[in-house]
Amino acid sequence: MKFRTGYTKARWVALAAATLLVASACGDAGSDDSETGEYEVAESPEFEEGSRMAELADQGSIKIGVKYDQPGIGFRGAGQDAPTGIDPELGKIIAGQLGIGPDDIEWVETISDNREPFLENGTVDLVIASYSITDERLEIVGQAGPYYVTGQSLMVAADDDSINGPDDLEGKTVCSVRGSTSIDTVEQEYGAEPAGFDTYSECNDQLINGSVDAVTTDGAILLGYAAENPDELKVVGEPFSEERYGVGYSPDAPEMCEFLNETIQSSFDDGDFETAFDLTLGKSGNEMPEEPALDPCAA
């Protein structure tokens, strides 16, 4: 399939208010440390007529669903004009290849439970929201990638030594967001009592006030919350699953898969993804992870 031919690229400098994801006890994971990331915006990109890419390029704008409560992943603090994190940064990279600059991206807060509905009903054009690729989701929507691989972990109270890993969860009340793979895993595989909420921030609050015994989701997300409350919270044990973050798109636009995979791979090759990582998750001191192999698109 032909995606783009004969175009030149203009460089733009996007102001990225990079959220610090710090695993040390400095407690500034949600601070606003503005830096600049440089990405490409295609000038007059060409796509196959009638494709969803061509439609988006012609209208010159795009709606992207991201999280607003995950430091380093997708976070929008009080007074911030736009969300920050690795997912919004990738959204800017993708939009740029459609000829759409950052000012023409409409960010839509997206929680775990409404990611598929938002894609099915057209509320958003893309979902980039710590969106693990699963067979079940692929039966409902399209997912391209993965662009990042992490693992499910546990966060507990700083003075709790009774939970050191998933094998200690039998009968414990564990919080995660509704519709996430994490809450299903601890219930079905480790015998935990699930407590589902709409956002991880709510789970974080439930743990601090003692209403739940632990919070579970991807390790990168938990480190951000623990860093904001180092005297009250800690991340324990080793990751016990593999979570492969992908970009969600409408099931009515299967042609998006090849475009998204091509754009993700190009961002690996030209260093744009590393720039995005360094501005966000890299602030924790973590090194840029090995790039994952992209899943092939369905024939």
Image: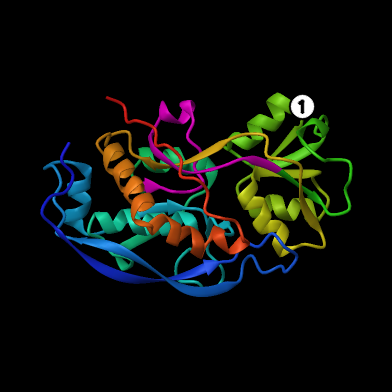
Is 226 rendered above or below residue 111?
Answer: below
Rate crowding at label 1 as few (under 14), some (14 to 19) or many (20 or more) other CA atoms within 10 Å.
some
Which residue is drawn at the image coordinates 30% and 56% (left, top)? 95
| Residue 102, picture quadrant | bottom left
Say what secondary structure mark 1 lies in: loop
Query: Could you tell me which quadrant the C terminus lies in?
Result: top left
Query: Is residue 135 within the magenta segment?
Result: yes
Q: Left of 98 or right of it: where is 234? A: right
Residue type at numbered disc 1: Gly
Q: Is residue 55 shown to the viewer in this render?
A: yes
67 or 226: which is nearer to us? 226
158 or 172: which is nearer to us? 158
Query: Is residue 290 within the magenta segment?
Result: no
Which residue is drawn at the image coordinates 53% and 55% (left, top)? 73
Q: Left of 261 or right of it: where is 276? A: right
Residue 99, position as x, y percentages in the image: 22, 59
Q: Which residue is mark 1?
A: 191
Q: Bounds of the magenta span?
A: 126-153
